[in-house]
Amino acid sequence: MEPTGLWLIGARGSVATTAIAGLLALRAKAVQPTGCVSALPQFSGVWLPGWDDLHVGGHDIAEIALDKRAELLAESGIIPHRVFEAVRQSLSDVDGQLRQGYHPATNPGSQADAARRLADDIGEFAARHGLARVVVINVSSTEPVFPVLPEHATLQALEAAMAVPGRTVLPPSSVAAYAALRAGCPFVDFTPSTGIRLPALEELAAQQGLPYAGSDGKTGETLVRSTLAPMFAARALRVRSWSGTNLLGGGDGLTLADAEHAGSKLASKGRGLATLLGSEVTAPLHIDNVPDLGEQKIAWDHVSFEGFLGARMSLQFTWSGYDSALAAPLVLDLARFTAAAHRAGRAGPLGALGFFFKDPWGTGEHRLAEQFTALASWAESL
Amino acid sequence: MEPTGLWLIGARGSVATTAIAGLLALRAKAVQPTGCVSALPQFSGVWLPGWDDLHVGGHDIAEIALDKRAELLAESGIIPHRVFEAVRQSLSDVDGQLRQGYHPATNPGSQADAARRLADDIGEFAARHGLARVVVINVSSTEPVFPVLPEHATLQALEAAMAVPGRTVLPPSSVAAYAALRAGCPFVDFTPSTGIRLPALEELAAQQGLPYAGSDGKTGETLVRSTLAPMFAARALRVRSWSGTNLLGGGDGLTLADAEHAGSKLASKGRGLATLLGSEVTAPLHIDNVPDLGEQKIAWDHVSFEGFLGARMSLQFTWSGYDSALAAPLVLDLARFTAAAHRAGRAGPLGALGFFFKDPWGTGEHRLAEQFTALASWAESL
Amino acid sequence: MEPTGLWLIGARGSVATTAIAGLLALRAKAVQPTGCVSALPQFSGVWLPGWDDLHVGGHDIAEIALDKRAELLAESGIIPHRVFEAVRQSLSDVDGQLRQGYHPATNPGSQADAARRLADDIGEFAARHGLARVVVINVSSTEPVFPVLPEHATLQALEAAMAVPGRTVLPPSSVAAYAALRAGCPFVDFTPSTGIRLPALEELAAQQGLPYAGSDGKTGETLVRSTLAPMFAARALRVRSWSGTNLLGGGDGLTLADAEHAGSKLASKGRGLATLLGSEVTAPLHIDNVPDLGEQKIAWDHVSFEGFLGARMSLQFTWSGYDSALAAPLVLDLARFTAAAHRAGRAGPLGALGFFFKDPWGTGEHRLAEQFTALASWAESL
Amino acid sequence: MEPTGLWLIGARGSVATTAIAGLLALRAKAVQPTGCVSALPQFSGVWLPGWDDLHVGGHDIAEIALDKRAELLAESGIIPHRVFEAVRQSLSDVDGQLRQGYHPATNPGSQADAARRLADDIGEFAARHGLARVVVINVSSTEPVFPVLPEHATLQALEAAMAVPGRTVLPPSSVAAYAALRAGCPFVDFTPSTGIRLPALEELAAQQGLPYAGSDGKTGETLVRSTLAPMFAARALRVRSWSGTNLLGGGDGLTLADAEHAGSKLASKGRGLATLLGSEVTAPLHIDNVPDLGEQKIAWDHVSFEGFLGARMSLQFTWSGYDSALAAPLVLDLARFTAAAHRAGRAGPLGALGFFFKDPWGTGEHRLAEQFTALASWAESL
């Protein structure tokens, strides 16, 4: 098989650490691939890099050692103790592949220089391991909404602005996307941050002939919504309101409950619902920071709907999950599927990967069942 | 268009009364077809009898007048007062089309005689209105499980036994199915009762070249289950237990909570879940009679599942609906689709109508999204 | 018995209309006093005005006739049709007792003049019916938070400011409270608006020797919270977070979801929780306007708590009620209990009525069970 | 202080092991007494044996070492790893105090002999540690319902029957109660088994002048019910149905879901509800064995109630707890309070401890708030 790189932006975060520990545990046959879509029988005939073929590196602005980070996750119950013990040493090895990430506050030079440095890190990683390709996946914290600037319109204008020392024309996620593309790597955005979603960066992706996918991993409330909403549509039941509350602990709770940050997340959640139901509905949505929940993520949704002769009925659900446990296997799936797409010469937004995202690019399909069917037939076509 | 008959077994029950009142209200343009699948844009190009083309008759062993029954439903909020007022007179007219149903306790003669009388009722109804066809739909109360008898194996053996005076070789639902087939009518079973599901009756259906569909309308908990279960499968999440409790009032609660009766209903609910998840799971299920709920039907499900690295998570939902409001539009849909199938010369079990049933015949597909896709493409093929 | 007046501020609103229709129905023996605390056997030995002794009048700025308003509530299911029919005529009679309420926008003169007019209305009502006393209860819409002004500090300063034409020194609820006190009437605030809660008005109440009670009727989420929170305390379980979401339709949803208005409501909800649990907890709280719910009011609370050896556990509840049906009987209770207190010569804040309020005056007790015990022994003492 | 014994029947079970590990951890100051009612400030002035004064022994028919059992609970998350490490050695020491329990299948002799042996074990334990008193608490698995026999009527008849070799006139819980009383020890029943609840044993307790308490620890659904039901009563709301489902894993799930065993548990749950609400309600109740839940215990209750003018409303709650974590601190509380009662010379059923039980003896009070008040004033009176 071909050795394949997985380069994580935010490599020391909960999602990344869980994904890395899980990959190492899968490689050590210490766990089953529960939660890994790419390990389903449906994809057994598709070329995908094996667990042994995936090499992990990444950027982060945090400096905590990966094994230390994993130990904290073991204490909070996300990584079982025996799994942590089984992979502790290999985590240390992966830690040696991680490089200092980019943040404007700590990088006083030009964003062009910063991007060059990031791209070089990825290039060296690829060379060091003799990798056929490297998939770059952004799993860092959600950024505040970044203003639209005229320089985002074309690659030429963008690169001119990036060259100005001290000028912050891009948010960190977009600098990372730029660096990935310049390094010849497919880019996947698991967050709702800006990332590659700028005309200038799409131009660069096209120029480089690279595929990309996103955005915002669909791991909880939206996963259930994209499953349930089509039921109402198929049964001609009229949804009158769909109210949601999300309780999040951990860093995500803090980041997302902040009004400014929540802007991007709430927007990507809301967009899907209207599409799924075929019309706008009253849909109040909240994200609350509840620190004591830790990695736990609880969502309550109340759907009020109308049936025959105007009968008023309701469905409510409570989802109680662990964010990293839900996201991590999808990160591995995305690495594998995107690698396969790159190998098959696909370029542009990978609509077939919409199955994984709240705000899927390259497709208007939000219904989970249809997304899965599309994913399966696309995978076969590679 | 072709005038089409809808003959309801249990025509004075809540579901039938709501379906009839709703049909009359649709015809009077007093309501929207909310909850009617056949009225979705997806089926606008398919030949289906219009609301004006459907003529209703039926059998029941109860004697309450249909408009009186509808008035009770109006008082309990199932039929809005203004709708009831709009259709009260037409309900009286339909009441004139209803005939005395069959029950062993009140029919001391042979079941052959009883079936002949039922078939004649349907035949006269068809003649009276110049109907192109009559679809017979069973919406009567769920029967206790009926023992398997050797006489059920072939049509010849069955008819010999039916001819014996005083012998009860078939439950009422199967007598109704036999009569429908003998009258040349497609038969649909909206209940989990035995109905047409006997080799002898399938033989008769085949001999008559008639289509049939069933069984057990999917209107609540199972509807949600068949929507949600595929999500877990598609995401490679391992469901460890799926527990359910149903609170029902009205006659249904009384009938189904009874251990013997519940047998058939619980069995048809359980069958789907294992199929949907691809393996057996712990799945305790209860149906409780809670009279004060009236027509309301509340289901609580708790799903315990495992994700990446063994993470233990859960999803719970509470469904609160009105049984008749959920079932009635589907009865109209089934009349229309089955009529279209009969017109197109289809015979045997209509697997494409599995979308409507807990225990679908003629197909192994239980996933709602896939069932809807199958229904749509089948309808187009007619 | 002594004829007693109940004067409602916001007399044409949902709560008032339901309370009036209910009182008339009780008088007509058309309904049971379900939801009326004062009708419990515990209070059978206490002097309370009977249903026949209560005469209703009130102020409102809306002009819809009371029987028309009640008809709308009958259509939305709050008042049963048969009850509406039974009281329709008497509602019309009560409508004749209602007078134009005060709102700054429509009263260009001084607030002193406005208050005098309001007090006169009440006085004439009392005289017309030969009432022993009139209890004034505010059930109007929640007001935006009103700024604290220096003139609120003393009665003298306040009355001086009120005399200035065009000057708005008080919100409408406080003008109503002032008028009530000037008319010699006890004042009860069922809303979280400012009302009597100003030093100057408390001074006036003391001067007049009048009792008063409030504030903010405890009818849903807070009712359950004040019941459940003591359980955690009594069992030494440590509540770590208590998150709440309220979905409201109707006018209340619109008023309360508005950030400015919600200020006062959220504050009165939050105050109790910390008191009940004995310490501050993370307690995010939302009030959403979901118009399709109409009079329905749905609250979801998620309590995360810690037990022995740090075990992490949770309790969640969903409350689904009808606001007016919950509030209306308490309005009648408050009229009766406050009348009894006035008759017994009580003055100042009636802490024993804290049982009825989210933000009880004159007591620090928020625990429902203890509040009920206190109410019962106070009532006996009258 | 006076050294006090706590003798546990079922000393190697989950509840006992958690209680013992917790006691050792409290003694080592490794944890806070969260969940321990007796550690609340309300009881700081009451004489109670301190954590250091409690010595633990017990009977069990299982043979797994206590530290091994605790390790399993640590793996399933009930006992935190660091707590387990801190008490591992002391657990081994307690294990040395445990003796073989009684079970008819393994004790072919007379029940009199068996009881004598059990009493001797307790006596030796008391002598070994110089204990002022020993409180015997039954925390073993719930027994099947045992038939009522004429020999249960008097102590004399019972002892005559117990002397017959091979005769099983008592269930194991009652043999344990008899042995405790004969050894001069107060007896507490944390289970719904027969235990001391036989005229003959009550006679013995009276003769010995011993206090006793029970039965069936109130740790989950019933705890919430006894908190919420009084709210409906105090607000004059009419509960129409109260439906419950319990999902249990672990040994308890297996034991209780069994129809025969569940008999005693369901009965003790149901008794309280009718008392709390003041009248019978429809109250279907289920206990399901869901092994994957392990120590987790999930209860869902749906309460349908009626308010003013017949408004139909509902409250539902989901309780998700860990059985042993909820029960264990109460076992320590009961040891302390019962020791104090014995020291104060109290005899007979301790109604004031009803706060801890689903089926409280010696009191008709089921309301949690009132039970807490009664407990506090009783404790002060000692």
Image (spheres, coloured by chain):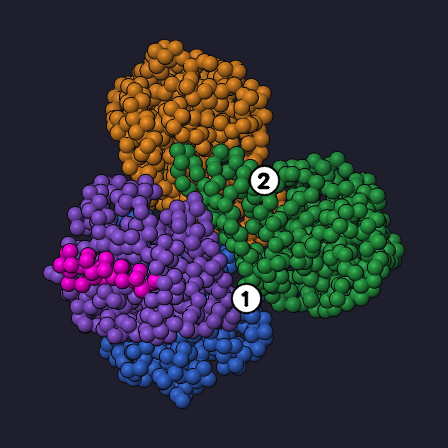
Chain colours: A orange, B green, C blue, D purple
Tell me, yes or no, whether the highlighted magenta stretch contains residue D120.
Answer: yes
Circle 1: element type: helix
Q: Point out the image quarter for the C terminus of chain B.
A: top right
Q: In which quarter of the image is residue D184?
A: bottom left
Camera-side residue: D322 or C253? D322
Image coordinates of residue A368 in percent, x first then y, are: 54, 36
Image coordinates of residue B321 in percent, x first then y, are: 57, 55
Camera sees residue A210 = yes
- Residue at x 56% of width, y 68% of height: C74
Camera sees residue C200 = no
Q: In this view, does A97 lie to the left or right of C91?
A: left
Label annotation for residue B275: 2
- Residue at x 45% of width, y 73% of height: D279
Return the residue at label 1.
B292
Q: What residue type is labelled 2?
A: Thr
* Front position among marks 1 and 2: 2
